[in-house]
Image (spheres, grey):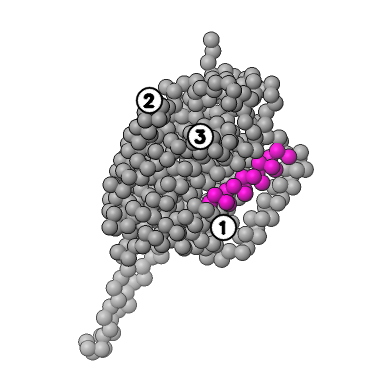
Amino acid sequence: MNKLLTTLCVGLGLWFSAAAMAQTAEPPKDAAAPPAATAPAEPAAAAAPADAAAPAAEAKPAVTVDKGDVAWMMTATLLVILMVLPGLALFYGGLVRSKNMLSVLMQVLMVFSLITVLWAIYGYSLAFGGEGAIIGTLDKVFLQGVTTASLADTFTENVKLPELIFVAFQATFAGITCALIVGSFAERIKFGSVLLFSAIWFTFSYLPIAHMVWGPGGYLLGKGALDFAGGTVVHINAAMAGLVGAYMLGKRIGYGREAMPPHSLTLTMVGASLLWVGWFGFNAGSNLESTAGAALAFLNTLLATAAAVLAWSIGEALHKGKASMLGAASGAVAGLVAITPACGSVGPMGSIVIGLVAGFLCLWGVTGLKKMLGADDSLDVFGVHGVGGIVGALLTGVFAAPSLGGTGAEDFSIAHQLLVQAEGVVITIVWSGVVAAIAYKIVDLVLGLRVSEEEEREGLDITYHGESAYNR
């Protein structure tokens, strides 16, 4: 096993070295160096005639770091952490059986912690360093050059942020993306395997997709893809990895024959509520400034989520005769997912339509589509995050049009933007799916993926953590 791990680590190092050498060595756009001191103006020549004097060039506006922006980004980062811990952990934990409650909480906590550390070591550099089309460089490995004086870009040319807070904010995105995958294979995977898979998939799927969409020189960024806060990077990316995992691990013992109801819808509701609150930092924080752009993302996050709750509940009532608490909570998450790529580009009425569509389609995703796929996606990661992410990514290309209240340019073409958005969706699905399949296979060879039948029946809380969530 040690030889296999050593071989894997050497392979990862060689791959990254080759990728880094293939990219240009220019400094990353999102980590601009502090502005140089302004040179003093040259004294005017007294003997020169007035009519020969050249007009002084207009000085560029000075670079500024606004304390309000910094305070907002620190708050937004805290809100995203709240989404994961305890939000996502409780949402997932309430949905599993009581014998696996702690295992899900532990997996979410440990995956988020692991990815946060890997982000600082090499993830930030590969995602936002260099000018490569697919991956960045290792110029910022171990956060080399990231100091209290270094600055990161915002959407306003002369307004910057301390690079340290940009690193922290983006770390939370990477962490929650990998933690989302946990819901697909819950209740049947080995604890160590979750961590090894997360490290591999983060390295070869999350980082390239993040760079392509958000990084300097990124392929999809250059194509004009709109993904304000992570519809492709976070939700479709994670959902595809989860779906592949559900197939490769197989169905839970008794799936389809035994009842497997959530053990605590109360905790699931608490988790969903915390997700909604934290998501304001996720979406509005992606504006990087405390401006009207953040206010637009904030309002759209509120409206789309409320609309999705209504749509899911109405659809469930029409289909089953009753609207459930689980359905309403799931509808909220569906709306949050769908508005994520669009929140900074569409108008309020567009966000409501996106939420309504996502509510109905994600309901179908966890019922009809799930049966068609035949996978035991334990907590419906693909049905909610995959379907919701695709809906949001595509509808961004529609409702970003200024004629529909969006923020697109006057020459905005819905047809063209839809093609660009669709390309981003397809690239993410294929890339994540292939990387996930390889990563699961490697983990299976090294550690094994699935727990034994005896361990699964007893529950992962006791067999892997020696604890029980509830003491009787």
Inspect the magenta stretch and tell me whether residue 439 lies in it: yes
First in sequence, mark 3 or 1: give its number: 1
Say which residue appears at 47% left-offset and 43% top-offset: 387
The image's mark for residue 380 is: 3
The quadrant where residue 154 appears: bottom left
Mark 2: few/some/many CA within 10 Å (<14, 14-19, 20+): few
157 left or right of 366 in image: left
231 left or right of 284 in image: right
Q: Which amino acid does label 3 sit on?
A: Asp
Is residue 347 in view from this perspective?
Answer: yes
- The residue pinned by badge 2 equals 321
170 left or right of 254 in image: left
> Do the residues under discs 2 and 1 have CB atoms within 8 angstroms?
no
- Find residue 345 and report its horizontal and vertical position in percent: 34, 53
> Gap in Å between the C-alphas at discs 3 and 1?
30 Å
The residue most toward the top is 472
Q: In this view, does 376 lie above or below 131?
A: above
Secondary element type, mark 2:
loop
> Do the residues under discs 3 and 2 have CB atoms within 8 angstroms?
no
